[in-house]
Image (cartoon, rainbow, N blue to C red):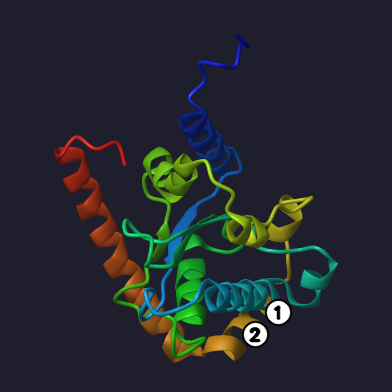
Amino acid sequence: MTKHANIDWKTATHAAWTTDILKHGMDVMGVLKFSNGRHITRTDAAKLWATYWHKMDRVFFGHAADKGFGIERRCFTEAGEDGKNLHMHFAALAPITTKVFCAVANAVWVNMNRRTANYTCNWITPLLYAEQGAAYTAKSTKRFAIDETGLRHTWRNIDTKATLDFDTEAQITRITNAIGLEELEQAHEWVNVHIVNVKRRFEARQARGKAY
């Protein structure tokens, strides 16, 4: 019997991803849902997620996105308890003020396509409870299955610090060009709503004795 025979690989894999999220200082957690996750194919879902992350990288880093700069993120696809409700959980390191990044990220997704979910259903917030939030975001890894789509959209920068030093004025211009100030204000209001709801859900889970 090998020394690895008694390892619970599902738990170990989940713990490793949770640690990775925390180690790299991710400060945002979110979900990318569809207006109806049960009526979209995996192929179409993957295309929309690819379009989204490409646009987000462009909004924040402009042409530098072609040179390897992107939003530091870890992505995990899920299909709900019955395996039919496609959506993507992610943790990210905001390259600007966290709440503003959350608002931009949600506004881009909500307004991107008729099949993407609205603000009521799609939540992107600061990572309020680091350990629990990271564990929740990566919970799909407990299946110990290969998540090709999640891995494809996960991004690791060679120099994370460099992504935090970009021209702020240029970023503001790209953000307002992408979504507009009025939409950004609306998205920011929804971030505040979702923060309150995340806190309520966390307290409810704690009361039920759930870790995350």
Q: Are marks 1 and 2 in contact (CB under 8 Å)?
A: yes
Q: Residue at x 30, y 65 (%)?
A: 194
| Picture quarter with the C terminus | top left
Amino acid on which disc 2 is placed = Thr
C-alpha gap between disc 1 and disc 2: 5 Å
In this view, the residue in front, 169 or 48, is 48
In this view, the residue in front, 88 or 120, is 88
The single residue placed furthest to the right in the displayed view is 67
Q: Residue at x 82, y 72 (%)?
A: 66
Side of 69 where 36 appears, left or right: left
Side of 149 where 10 appears, left or right: left
Side of 100 where 123 appears, left or right: left
Q: Residue at x 37, y 72 (%)?
A: 122
- Residue at which label 2 appears: 173
In this view, the residue in front, 16 or 21, is 16
Residue 147: image location, x then y, percent: 58, 53
Q: For the image shown, how many numbered marks are present on the structure?
A: 2
Neighbor class of circle 1 (other Cα within 10 Å; few <14, some 14-19, many 20+) is few
Which labelled disc corresponds to residue 85? none
Q: Which secondary structure lies at badge 1?
A: helix
Residue 90: image location, x then y, percent: 50, 57
The answer to whether residue 6 is above or below residue 34 is above
- Residue at which label 1 appears: 170
Neighbor class of circle 2 (other Cα within 10 Å; few <14, some 14-19, many 20+) is few
Q: Which secondary structure lies at badge 2?
A: helix
Side of 129 where 93 appears, left or right: right
Residue 121: image location, x then y, percent: 31, 73
Q: Quadrant of residue 56?
A: bottom right
Amino acid on which disc 1 is placed = Ala
| Picture quarter with the N terminus | top right
